[in-house]
Amino acid sequence: MPGRTKNRDDASEEVDTSMDDAPTSAQKPTEEENGDAMEEDGSEGGDPFEEEEEPQRVRILPGSSETAASFEFLKEGHTLGNALRYIIMKNPDVEFCAYAIPHPSEDKMNLRIQTYDTTTAAAALAKGLQDLEDLCDVVSDKFWTEREKFEATPEQSLKRQEEAERRLEAEA
């Protein structure tokens, strides 16, 4: 049996809700977004090798506060999510950090950060991203240093020379 439907008198009492909390896909574009694309492009004779600006890939999800926020990363997955979660949890000002992939077919990763009152969730995210970048730089430098040492050993030089000679003989 169908539920009670609203009378016209009941409908007039309803208040229109704000679209601020609605997903961006459901919101109508603003006038700024509807502007003349050709003017914003600057492609009237500019540098043909100039890279196009990439759309923003991180946004704060609705319902966030200063110390507890959820962030949505586009085109990211478990690789960044788990590494970032680990680094952010090393911060003593962070109470909780977790990530989730909402659905395997969506190219999104959500990260939830809750901090103590000493810092904000956005500041914890910024620090975590910087710390992760610094860690990657250290690992990369160490890798290339050790690789160059390995390539410089006499055994490796002799091995590369023998392989080059074999290739020349095979071609002949």
Image (tube, grey):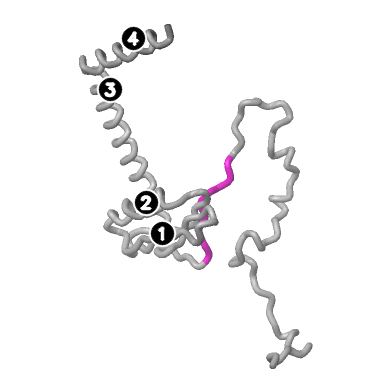
From the viewer's side, name the closer residue of 86 and 68.
Answer: 86
Name which residue type carries label 1.
Tyr
Residues at marks 2 and 1 touching, judged by CB atoms closer than 8 Å: yes
Q: Mark 3 or mark 2, which is nearer to you?
A: 3
Q: Quadrant of the N terminus?
A: bottom right
- Residue at which label 4 appears: 165
From the viewer's side, name the closer residue of 14 and 138.
Answer: 138
Q: Which residue lies at the image location 61% right of the left edge and 29% below the top edge?
A: 50
Residue range corresponding to the magenta coloring: 54-62
- Residue at which label 2 appears: 84
The secondary element bearing badge 1 is classed as strand
Residues at marks 2 and 4 touching, judged by CB atoms closer than 8 Å: no
- Residue at which label 1 appears: 99
Viewed as shown, does residue 7 lie left or right of 165? right
Name which residue type carries label 3.
Glu
Residue 129's tag is none
Name which residue type carries label 4.
Glu
Residue 91 at what x, y percent from top left? 29, 54
Q: Earlier in the sequence, mark 1 or mark 3?
A: 1
- Residue at which label 3 appears: 148
Q: Mark 1 or mark 3, which is nearer to you?
A: 3
From the viewer's side, name the closer residue of 143 and 68.
Answer: 143
Q: Which residue lies at the image location 55% right of the left edge and 47% below the top edge?
A: 56
Residue 21 at what x, y percent from top left? 59, 67
Query: Is 118 part of what is drawn in magenta?
Result: no
Q: Quadrant of the C terminus?
A: top left
Where, by quadrant of the figure, is residue 148 drawn?
A: top left
Q: CA distance from mark 2 to mark 1?
A: 9 Å
